């Protein structure tokens, strides 16, 4: 019933604000330092307007796309988000199942609270995102486990050389591991739905949420110290490790977090199959420009050879179409899907997917196109003087 009130992806955020304890909502919705990049991710879309064509037969519209030799039902997928099972009961499984049913890709986060073997069982087409340390032995060990589990696509996130400034998490009362506090207890009491259906249900059925991700040999309560260790490791991942990964990983290899054309070229020359232009939803270096702004130059540099995808601030079908017009082969959406899982479980995520897909279809009709190949830069006009 709650879902019937939700008519757009932004509506999920408003509902989630009421549903989730403040520290957890803050963790999902927030970004780094001043949130400048988070805001820019949205404003970049607002600075572009459409030039629709009329009196076109649009009865044969399709938003199906082919990516890495596979047909998907829509040009968007679910971005990897860590510790989703803290927001929604068995969050990663919910996201994986809804995506599988809708035939769109779902990227499982390497910072998940759910075992990767369980996620791939729920959706054999799911992709796996990894944060890798610069230690060849551990890299190879992880690749082996991910391959053995049955993942076909590996997304390597590379914008996390050091941990971002988490001051907004501190303000929201979110810590890792989550520390019991009066505020958290009070928050849980006034949000019984989350407390009963997510937290206590997890606790009773699966024990204290543990990090059973790829690095952890032993789980650590709520947020893994082992992941922290990887971020702080002396041996950082570098381009030489990427060559090793490419040599060993026989599946599809995607690199996520590229923002410059130089890095895009190096990645392409290292043999990656695709690139996700991303500023991590504004959660790493605050002040990084929106991926939508960097997209055209990266497409210009490598778009002819490998698919260039993007994420960050995509909330409407019109946003998806703008990114595609600027050369994106595919887009990913993050936060709204976790809110949807938190509020409505698998039905919530399916609802979110349907909303976005119908907006794309409707907007294609209003733009006068039948296929996404028709979205070119000349369908857009850059507006000036748009207030953020
Ligand atoms: C993320 N993101 C992320 N990325 C990644 O590669 N590995 C991860 O574990 C996470 N974890 C994570 C947690 C949460 C709560 C959020 C909101 C984001 C970044 C994510 O994949 C994606 O780049 C952005 O979220 C996209 O921006 P939007 O759609 O949220 O605006």
Image: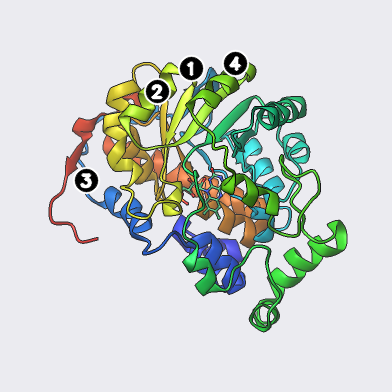
* Alpha carbons under labels 4 and 3: distance apart: 43 Å
- Residue under label 2: 266
Report, in whole angstroms, how far the alpha carbon at label 1 lies from the one at label 4. Answer: 9 Å
Label 3 CB sits under 8 Å from any ligand 1 atom: no
**Nearer the camera: disc 3 or disc 1:** 1
The label on residue 247 is 4
Figure check: 179 above or below 143: below
> Is disc 4 surrounded by few (<14), some (14 to 19) or many (20+) residues within 10 Å?
few
For label 2, the SS is: helix
Q: Position of residue 360 (x, y in %)?
A: 40, 41
Tag nearer the camera, 1 or 2: 2
Q: Quadrant of residue 122?
A: top right
Which quarter of the rendered picture does the C terminus lie within? bottom left
Instruction: Provide residue 117's location: percent of width, then percent of height.
Output: 77, 36
- Residue labelled with disc 3: 49
Query: Horizontally, is 379 left or right of 358 in the view?
Result: left
Tell me, yes or no, whether the two marked residues, 1 and 2, touch with CB atoms within 8 Å: no
Whichever of callouts 1 and 2 sits on the residue coming sooner in the sequence is 2
**SS assignment at label 3:** strand
Dot 2 alpha-carbon crowd within 10 angstroms: few under 14, some 14 to 19, many 20 or more: few
Residue 80 pos. (x, y %): 57, 44
Q: Earlier in the sequence, mark 2 or mark 4?
A: 4
Q: Which mark is residue 271?
A: 1
- 316 horizontally vs 225: left or right: left
Q: Residue at x 79, y 43 (%)?
A: 217
Residue appearing at x 33%, y 49% in the figure: 288
- Do the CB atoms of the residues marked 3 and 1 lie less than 8 Å apart? no
Residue at position x 58%, y 20% in the image: 244
Whole-angstrom CA distance, mark 1 to mark 2, is: 9 Å
Residue 356 percent across, percent down from the top left: 46, 46
Residue 347 or 171: which is nearer the viewer? 171
């Amino acid at each position: 019933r709650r879902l019937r009130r939700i008519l757009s992806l932004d509506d999920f955020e408003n509902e989630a604000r009421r549903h989730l304890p403040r520290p957890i909502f803050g963790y999902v919705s927030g970004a780094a330092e001043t949130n400048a990049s988070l805001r820019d991710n949205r404003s970049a879309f607002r600075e572009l307007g459409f030039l629709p064509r009329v009196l076109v037969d649009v009865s044969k519209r399709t938003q199906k796309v082919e990516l890495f030799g596979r047909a998907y039902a829509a040009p968007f997928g679910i971005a990897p988000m860590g510790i989703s099972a803290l927001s929604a009961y068995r969050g990663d499984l919910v996201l994986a199942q809804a995506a599988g049913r809708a035939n769109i890709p779902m990227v499982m986060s390497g910072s998940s609270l759910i075992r990767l073997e369980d996620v791939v069982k729920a959706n054999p087409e799911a992709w796996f995102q990894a944060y890798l340390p610069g230690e060849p032995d551990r890299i190879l060990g992880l690749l082996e486990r991910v391959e053995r589990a049955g993942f076909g696509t590996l997304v390597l996130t590379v914008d996390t050389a050091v941990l971002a400034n988490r001051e907004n998490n501190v303000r929201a009362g979110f810590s890792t591991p989550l520390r019991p506090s009066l505020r958290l207890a009070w928050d849980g009491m006034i949000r019984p739905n989350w407390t009963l259906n997510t937290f206590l249900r997890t606790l009773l059925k699966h024990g204290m949420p543990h990090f059973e991700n790829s690095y952890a040999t032993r789980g650590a309560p709520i947020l893994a110290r082992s992941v922290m260790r990887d971020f702080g490791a002396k041996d950082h991942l570098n381009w030489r490790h990427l060559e090793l990964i490419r040599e060993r990983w026989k599946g599809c290899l995607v690199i996520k977090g590229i923002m410059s054309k130089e890095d895009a070229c190096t990645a392409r020359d290292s043999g990656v199959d695709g690139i996700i232009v991303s500023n991590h939803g504004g959660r790493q270096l605050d002040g990084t420009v929106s991926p939508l702004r960097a997209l055209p130059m990266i497409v210009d540099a490598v778009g002819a050879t490998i698919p260039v995808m993007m994420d960050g601030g995509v909330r409407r079908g019109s946003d998806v179409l703008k990114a595609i017009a600027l050369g994106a082969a595919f887009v990913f959406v993050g936060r709204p899907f976790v809110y949807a899982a938190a509020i409505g479980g698998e039905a919530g995520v399916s609802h979110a997917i349907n909303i976005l897909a119908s907006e794309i279809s409707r907007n294609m009709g209003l733009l006068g196109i039948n296929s996404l190949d028709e979205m070119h830069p000349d369908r857009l006009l850059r507006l000036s003087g748009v207030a953020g």
